[in-house]
Amino acid sequence: MRLGKEKRMRMVAAVLGALWLGVFPLWQDLSYAHITHAKWVGALALCGVTVLVCLVAALVPARGKRSGQGLRRHPVWLVALAYFSWVALSACFGSWAGSVNGSGELVVWMGAIRYEGLLTHLCYGLIFLMMSLFPARKEPVLAAAAVALTVFCGVVALQYMGVNVLGLFPAGRSINTNYEFQGTIGNIDMVSGYLCLVTPLLLGDYVTREKGGWLQLAAGSLGAALIWCIEVQAGLIALAALCALIVLLMLRFPAYRVRGCVALAGVAAGFALRGLLFLPWLDSATPRAALPVELVFTWKALLGLLGVAVCLLLAWAFSHRQGKALPAKAILCLLLVCVLGGVWLMAILPVPESAGGLYELHEILNGRARDQFGSWRLGVWRHSLDMSRNSLIFGTGPDTFYYAMQDHLAKVGASLGENFDNPHNEYVAILCNNGLPALLLYVTLLAWLLVEVCRRRQWPLALAVGCFALQGFFSFSICLVTPMFWAVLGMAAAQCGGPQKAQTMTEVI
């Protein structure tokens, strides 16, 4: 009887996971004009559903003789509670805690512009805690995530063809006038965050399962293709990290080599697709011209097709002979050599200014950093770190960065080339808004969960959390995407609770 209850609770967790990864990314109110508000309302609504369902499910086993057998408890809960508690304290004691937004609302409660006040952070905390109660069944969650990602990519494809799907673009707007908005999430920086969370989850599951998973492979490959097409640098960095991590898994576990090569072929196919598409908003000399998307053949297409061929050839070879596993120490040494070698080459090789981000990295490594690098990100990071010294314990308060930074720039007599309402770095944002203790707790939470899911070989979760955390260095928290991340983080925490022997990567996500 107890086993039946656990199965039901796992299915409940799977349904909730499917809601966050299958329904929430498609949630919108048919307009980009107020999509952030629509997602915020959706996050609050689904959070309420999650809390209600989990509380009911938690009470079911409490009536039996073996109460609580299905719950997952882990000390990482305490870290999460401490983090959100400190965010709440920063709302009370932050140096800008009394500021009011344009609607006359308290900023630390409702947020300045993007609804990132304490109310939303409490929503994130509840999502994490509720999703960490029970380990979810794998298949429903991944199937929902794969279907949602496929639909999302389909919406973007129709937009590329000039179709205003769901009327998302307001009158007079289109993909040609505002390519920065795509899909049912909107801003491509946030689209990149969504892709950096779901694509590793799906491709990681395909690589690490014994058979099946073709839906995950297809959807994950579409996600990789969209990352190539939107060309957000944070997404490209995370995609490169994903490929490197898949290679490391292949080196360590011979059983993953065939499927790993197939997954890499999917990523290469996405690169080839980008090389076959002429996207006016990126490839035209006059990017705002209303030109159609055309099929072309460029060196990117050739290189991508060559990558597909090489990966599939290696998959065929590994299917006949997998080879031996490489020791973990050897893999770490190889990784260290590759990283140090890459940094050294980037520093000494001549990189033209037309290379964009690579040129800026080259200049930074040679001690020639400038504030305008990274669309003024480097400048806002520098000023943010300087500003944070004045409120190191409780920060300025949730989502008060815009007001605090404007005041700081005025005091030091400086200016930035763009108007920032956040530092475009999740970790710097936590430091500024909530203080150093909150940042340390957040990093501890991520690191602890990553270590735990790796110990239990829950590689899809490890890849998803790791890649999203990496892109967080160039992005920020917002209700368009962040609720999905906390849901995935909660599912990871659910895997860490309970006896380790009961957890296998073929049973639950």
Image (cartoon, grey):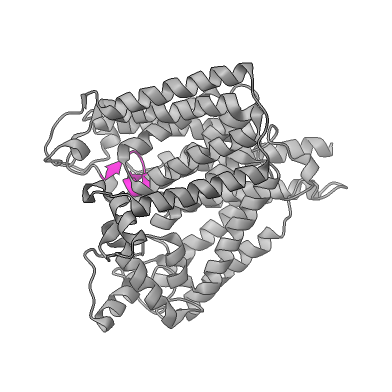
Residue placed furthest toward the front: 348
Q: Is residue 274 above or below residue 313?
A: below
Q: Is residue 260 above or below residue 239?
A: above
Choose between 220 and 373: the one closer to the eye.
373
Choose between 115 and 254: the one closer to the eye.
254
Choose between 61 and 384: the one closer to the eye.
384
Image coords of residue 344 (percent x, y): 41, 53
- Marker count (numbered): 0
Residue 186 covered by magenta stretch:
yes
Q: Is residue 93 left or right of residue 38?
A: right
Using the rendered image of the protein, determine whether residue 337 is visible from the camera's viewpoint. yes
Q: Is residue 277 left or right of residue 425?
A: left
Image coords of residue 234 (percent x, y): 38, 49
Choose between 234 and 72: the one closer to the eye.
234
Q: Is residue 373 above or below residue 435?
A: above
Q: Magenta stretch?
A: 180-191
